[in-house]
Amino acid sequence: MPVPAREALVTIDTRHPEGRIDDDVYGHFLESAFFGNIEGGVFDEGSPLSVDEPGLLQGVRADVLELCRELAPGPIRWPGGNFTSAYHWEDGVGPRETRPRRLELAWGGLESNRFGTDEFLAWCEAVGAEPYLVHSCRDVDEAVRWVEYTNAAQETALTARRARNGHAEPWKVKYWGVGNEVYGPWQMGHRTAEEYAAAAREHARFMRLVDPDIRLIGVGIPWQQEKWTRPLLRQAGHLFDHLSLHLYGAATHLWTGDDYDDVVAQSLFFEREMNTYAQLVTALAAEAGLDRPPALALDEWNMRHLEPAAWPDPLPGDDGGIAPRELPDVPPADRPGPVRVNRWSPRTVGDLVFYAGVFHAIHRTVGLPAPVSMANPVNLVNANGVIVARPGGAVRSAIYHVWHLYRHHLGRTVLPSRVDGPARSAAVRLGDNRGPDGRLLTEPMTVPYIDVSATRADDGSVRVAVVNRHRDETVRLRIVLDGAAADTPRSARVRTLGAGDPHAINTLADPDAVGVRDLGQVEASDGTWAAGPHSVTVLAF
């Protein structure tokens, strides 16, 4: 049937599910000594907003903890990130006053070690999240001792130490990362593909001897993928449950003023990269004789807000964004010179539309042999995070609501869906990938305005998540279930996320500028429902 302009035909097959979304794709990430993730974010000793009672949670921000608990988060990855490569876990256990203060080599600061393994695990327990610990993969014995300290039930010197430190029973940490971005020379312990494969095999083997039930994440790579992944799967693929993949988008609005369309389109690049790596991992796993390929863990991903490196360093503003600063003349949009990531730039409506598009791409991998079954955005608190914490309080950023909406109001069984609707041709940014001249790389693609993820919830209802990427226009949705328009319900429970301005943000002064509106039960108008511009909508049938 012909589709009128600004109307999208959405066809959904409820009878042939494609697979099940793993709750772990709604995970998160925290990095120690990183722009307020931990100190000044999760943990803020001396703040009147922090827990004062003695115990492992003493010094933890109570308001941040409560906002995290509301999310019902998936696995939380810690202590990094780049921080991991030089971290020694034993620096961060025992009485806080005896813990060493160290130079922090990843980000150039200091690490107090006052928030360590036991504090993090107690905090995860309090917010209802699975902890995901990452070891540097530089010392097998240290990794083995860490698993023993957290998970062993036998009476040993390390488990007795754990009991003295406040937790007699095993923590039962399920997820363990074996290295972080070991392929990069910015990592302490940088290795070639063959060297990492051998080290990962030895680490994984002996960590599993301590606890056979742990699930291990090996280091995957976003470039030179075949060269890196083949030796890893050949030597150690049978020991790993996941391979990691790190992807970052790029936004330029801090100096160009507006790049909404460029931001929201980048979920298409993410989808292509996830599928390409999933197919390669599947092929190389078969070549290595594995019974099954590891799944993918998108355990670092984000939209980076870039700015000219010549500008004064950004600092956190009291209201949740960037502190006021004097800026020099704005450079031309296409020639900013060297750029950097602004870690304090608040999340926008454009960001949330992008994030929802990435989730839809993740959902569509469920039928692959190597699906994306874990995802952890950078970051959970501060540093372009889901939650923003300042001395005066904490606020849900604009993107917080994507996680909350999908975690609580979308189903888990993916249903095949197809969209026939308006689109545009565009040069889509290939994330934060740049050419020799520093310019962001692009590739021609067709960008649909409407992106749909259709699911069945455990109560049997059909839940349809709809992203409308169009900046200005509402698109009407004509939804047909199982090929029969006459049998499609004419009423749906509708929740919609967005704001009037595609660059709107939440602040401590205006915490609800961007949020979810529950419209209740909505009747179809001439057989269609409205998806407003720059919005995310969930319909429940």
Image (cartoon, rainbow, N blue to C red):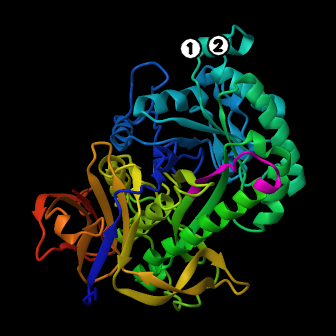
The quadrant the C terminus occupies is: bottom left
SS of the residue under disc 2: loop
For label 2, count other residues whose C-alpha is less than 10 Å away and answer few (under 14), some (14-19) or many (20+): some
Q: Are discs 1 and 2 less than 8 Å apart at CB?
A: yes
Q: Earlier in the sequence, mark 1 or mark 2?
A: 2
Is any atom of residue 507 visible in this view?
no
Q: Is residue 516 above or below residue 198?
A: below
Q: Residue at x 59, y 44 (%)?
A: 32
Amino acid type for the residue under numbered disc 2 = Ala
Is any atom of residue 419 visible in this view?
yes
Q: Residue at x 85, y 54 (%)?
A: 231
Whether residue 406 sits left or right of residue 132 in the image: it is: left
The disc placed on residue 169 is 1
Q: Residue 12: image x %, image y %?
A: 33, 65
Q: Is residue 508 magenta?
A: no
Please report the bounds of the magenta region as a residue range: 286-300
Q: Is residue 373 above or below residue 230?
A: above
Q: Residue at x 45, y 26 (%)?
A: 58
